[in-house]
Image (cartoon, grey):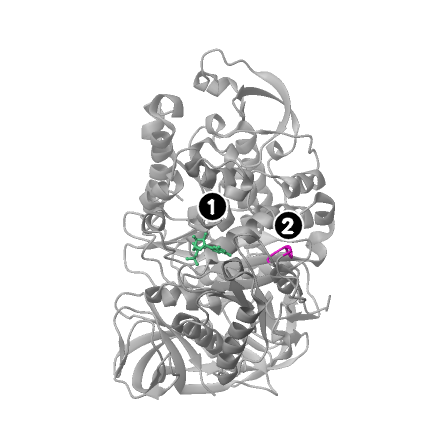
Amino acid sequence: MTANINFKLSQTIQLLRLATVGSVDDGKSTLIGRLLVDTKGAFEDQLLSVTRKKGAASEAEVDLAMLTDGLSAEREQGITIDVAYRYFATPKRKFIMADCPGHEQYTRNMVTGASTANAAIILIDARNGVMPQTKRHTHILSLLGTPHLVVAINKMDMVDYDQSIFEKIRADITAYCAKQGIKDLICIPISALHGDMVVTRGDSMSWYKDRTLLETLESIEVTDHIERLPFRFAVQYINRPQTEELPDFRGYCGRINSGIVRTGDTVTLLPSGKTSRIKEIVTFDGTPDEAFAPQSVTLTLVDDIDISRGDMIVHSDSTPEIRKEIEALVCWIGDEPLVARKKYIIKQTTNSVRAVAMDIVYRTDIHTLNQDNADELGVNEIGRVRFKLAQPIYCDAYADNRATGSFIIIDTFTNITIGAGMICG
Amino acid sequence: MSKYRLTQLKALEAESIHIMREVVAEFRNPVMLYSIGKDSSVMLHLARKAFYPAPLPFPLLHVDTAYKFPEMYEFREWFVKEIGAELIVRRNEDAINKGMNPKGFGVARCCGALKTQGLLDALEEGNYDAAFGGARRDEERSRAKERVFSIRDEFGQWDPKNQRPELWDVYNGRIHEGESVRVFPLSNWTEMDIWLYIREENIPIVPLYYAKERLMVERGNLLIPYYEKTKDQLLKGEEPTMVMSRFRTLGCMPCTGAVRSHATTIDEIVAEAAAARRSERETRIIDHGANTMEDKKKEGYF
Ligand SMILES: Nc1nc2c(ncn2[C@@H]2O[C@H](COP(=O)(O)OP(=O)(O)O)[C@@H](O)[C@H]2O)c(=O)[nH]1
């Protein structure tokens, strides 16, 4: 990054949320270290702190993987045990990268890291090709609906930068992805260690003519166009200043989940079903005529209607479903398995409701993608589950709307987050 | 750029506001830790946006070590009044009266008493169940894994191996009696974002961030500010000289280094931050031991 570029930067630069997944030793930490170093996202003193131990002097000898291994526990164990977030920027973009561990028991962290991502990099070791873990991760990414997938076939230096090996792996992973309905797959041959095709092209793979990894990340669409979806506004907080200047102000705070809202729009309030019109869109910076997802705003209505947290404001001509029973794909991340008839808390948008797991429709075998009968979902397992809810929620199918179709499952006893759910249509 | 795209700063802003409102909606008694630094200034600015037109629905808490720069105290008084916030100041008077200082007791013990213990005491006294902090994940390696909602046990301790996964933007704010949560609305901001946002939004910051001729003592690579109050923290033979300098981060006088700089405007600071090849944490003396931050955090340090 150079200084003069940064003067304009804040006006045009956009944010891309990325997740990086791969099996242990595929070179994920090395790749992220490489991206940080080559985009100057790592500072000299941080580089020094990871070279010191090895007595290395030059950048070439920096242990790139060490740059990203944060906690002492994992330095001792030599594995990455939790999602870490990395930040780097180019003159075009700022990147937030969720570094997701590849170890099997930490699949929950992958789900966590990928849930907010607009794009994911899947790492494959060129020597091993597509592994069971690769399939598991790809499957989870397809369930989460991660809009863009980039496969980085790493350690090309260890297979003599052989194009035929790259092509074989590309064919394998493309075929696997096709089975899951993933079409747009970008495959790039790289050497994270030496840097080929990561930020610079290097000179060992002249047969590869497409974009480097960083060029690819800079050109991916950053949005999934949530502003084009129907307007959804889950009420987060009721703003009632009750001050001398504002005795009667009553605003509904929230982050627009999807769509666009304009002053004067006719809206329906859920669950009451009453209608009203948008009086004003209130922000610290003024009262704009329109606002769009994912902005955080405060809405006021023309009518005085009783609304509380968890309610939803929507356009009257396109309302979501109001459901007391849902079927959802669930990624289970709790240590204790999900079992039928057990009670849970489901939090969807700003709404927390009690729920009972009615039954497990099926459990997906991650290797074959077969749907099996099951009595429980263990940690890291994925399946389709039916829930009955104590109160209705206002939702869309996850495939149509990530914000209103997703929920977390909370243990009623420990309060820990134990599952991730995606509502089926 | 299409009219329905947010710039990276506006995207970060929307996210931070969302986080703050979740906390205020779900917790009984939140508080915002206010450290007077640039990150606090940004966090406070975002809080004002989140609850506009209402005043802040929670007080600010400054855990004072008595070692902050005079310019910081001055700024604190002015800024808090300016925006009409409620400020609570707490100090570990016990330790301060016993003459706690970094040179005599060691930096770790001094921080432990004045910052960590001071904070834990203040949180307990106020019976807060949620405390906002301005920490960013890009600051330090062990913070890269910190959640936005970080659950602490009754002793304020953090267990890096037992954190709740955070999915989408659905935060789990359920806690047991006695537990509390530290919330970091600036998690995804980088130092650069902070400066760009301060520039874009015209956010007031302590003048120490701007370069000026200041009395400094040079120790190795470090520039240590010279003040009457803390001159006994200097080593034998150290003499102050005037140096054109500024601070990249602000902490306690004896433990915060400055950098040589001619950046006297926000544009110049942005340019300097963009060209910086060393992290801002380097000027914090407290980070110079191995793994210190993670250890401190386990004990309850922010
Ligand atoms: N030859 C070669 N080795 C690599 C490459 N990328 C990573 N490695 C090595 O593979 C090992 C595992 O890498 P690491 O980044 O720790 O993997 P992670 O477990 O996926 O984070 C380390 O010894 C790296 O130096 C590469 O492109 N070429």
The kind of residue tagged 2 is Tyr
Q: Position of residue B121 (x, y in %)?
A: 33, 41
The mark closer to the camera, 2 or 1, is 1
Q: Nearer the viewer, residue A333 or A38?
A: A38
Q: Position of residue A278 (x, y in %)?
A: 63, 75
Same chain for the residues under marks 2 and 1 in the image:
no
Instruction: Give left or right: position of A332 versus A306.
Output: left
Residue at the location (33% across, 80% down)?
A355
Q: Does residue B181 lie above or below B3 as drawn?
A: above
Q: Position of residue A45 (x, y in %)?
A: 52, 37
The kind of residue tagged 1 is Asp
Classify mark 1 as within 8 Å of ligand 1 or not, answering yes or no.
yes
State the mark number for residue B197: 2
Q: Nearer the viewer, residue A261 or B172?
A: B172
Q: Give the range drawn in magenta.
A: A198-203
Q: Does residue B283 lie above or below B175 as drawn?
A: above
Query: Element type at marker 2?
Result: helix
